[in-house]
Amino acid sequence: MLYQYLFPLVDTVGAFNVFKYLSFRAFGAAVTALMLALFVGPAIINYLKKMSFGQVVREEGPESHYKKSGTPTMGGLIMLFALFISMLLWMNFSSVSTWIVLFVTVCYGLLGFVDDYKKVVLKNTKGITAGQKLAAQFIVAGITAWLFIQFTDLNSELRFPFLKNFTIDLGVLYIPFGMLVIVGTSNAANLTDGLDGLLVGIIIITMVTFGLLTYLAGNAIFAEYLDIPYVKGVGELAVFCAAVAAAGLGFLWFNSHPAQVFMGDVGSLALGGAIGTLAVATKNELLLTIIGGIFVAEALSVMIQVLYFKKTGKRVFRMAPLHHHFEMKGLPESKITIRFWIIAILLAIIALATLKLR
Ligand code: 57M
């Protein structure tokens, strides 16, 4: 909004020229989102407590989690509130890609809210059935793929990390592929949200990485220097990435161990979906398997555990997802979380290095 209404007045107030700079608006969006999250956090946590939106901890989970029962969930509302207000102020309303990423974030957030509400308020521990959740996610992802094709110059080429000029044109198959990236990332993020601070820390690292990627790919000079495809208009997504990373930092203030609040599906599905959509918007679908390597490991651990158990009746991991396996081995929760963050930072550095290592 500030860009739309203040930049045109630049002839009268020269200082408004700053609003045309992406870096300035990304910085402004980050500061706004962080301050808002820190400011509204306590009020939202108290409201969730008052409404007794307490997490039901399943008995088959690790014993160390039993004491968490009753911790307010749906704290993802703190991040989404901070994100949307910050974007309203700092985004460029003419950025179609930003509206599309926000569309997925809102739709998946609503889906998560309904799931949380059914589980926590209506005490229907199953929430929405897995089939209903997946169907809704694929429908939103399908609309998103259509929006990208209709309103942006997104192409159906698949780029490979480390390979400079090698691409595969998926043609019409790009649509189901793109949908799979969005739905898969959302659900992998949801599975990862099982330890205090774990998911939000990974989201912060991922968003900083995508913020850099979008800023570089959206800047013709940097794109040429790094010899990466220049994707017109994608730079605006750096404002979104900065706002999410900062809102996440604000949420981490309350979600750090011992967590005062969990983000709930409203947060994990929304922000996981946003990450998948960013990968599609910036043509970094395969690079996401490196940046989001923790999500891949967590989802794979569940698939391996379920398939092996069905085949042999035995478990590969002491408990899936992977973070529970290390908990069952006796590692303290915060040690697992911080080691997963360290791995995520290493993966982000490798992903950024692939821009040059080609
Ligand atoms: C999402 N939700 C956490 C919290 C958070 C197929 C199977 C792998 C599914 C999976 C599952 O149920 N996943 C659901 C993970 C839950 O967190 C809530 O859910 C929201 C995210 N969607 O915001 O509201 C619990 O995680 C803990 N937590 C924290 N701190 C946080 O900041 O401590 C979450 C956030 C919370 C809290 O205890 O209650 C979750 O773990 O359910 N199922 C599992 O992950 C279960 N694994 C399992 O069943 N493994 C089996 C088979 C199926 C693979 C096996 O290994 O044989 C584990 N989770 C639970 N109990 N709750 C273990 C059993």
Image (cartoon, helix red, strand yellow):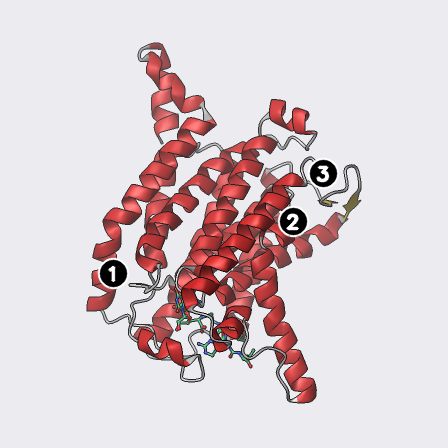
Residue 225 % position (x, y): 66, 24
Q: Secondary structure at mark 2?
A: loop
For marks 2 and 3, the one nearer the N-term is 2
Residue 247 % position (x, y): 37, 47
For the point 40% across and 81% down, the residue is 63
Comparing labels 2 and 3, the label whose residue is closer to the camera: 3
- The residue at which mark 2 appears reads as 285
Amino acid type at circle 2 is: Glu
Query: How far is disc 2 from disc 3 in space, using C-alphas?
Result: 18 Å
Q: Secondary structure at mark 1?
A: helix
Asked if the beta carbon under badge 2 is closer than 8 A to the nearest atom of ligand 1, the reply is no
- Which quadrant is the N terminus positioned in? top left
The numbered dot on residue 357 is 3
- The residue at which mark 1 appears reads as 45
Comparing labels 1 and 3, the label whose residue is closer to the camera: 3
For marks 1 and 2, the one nearer the N-term is 1
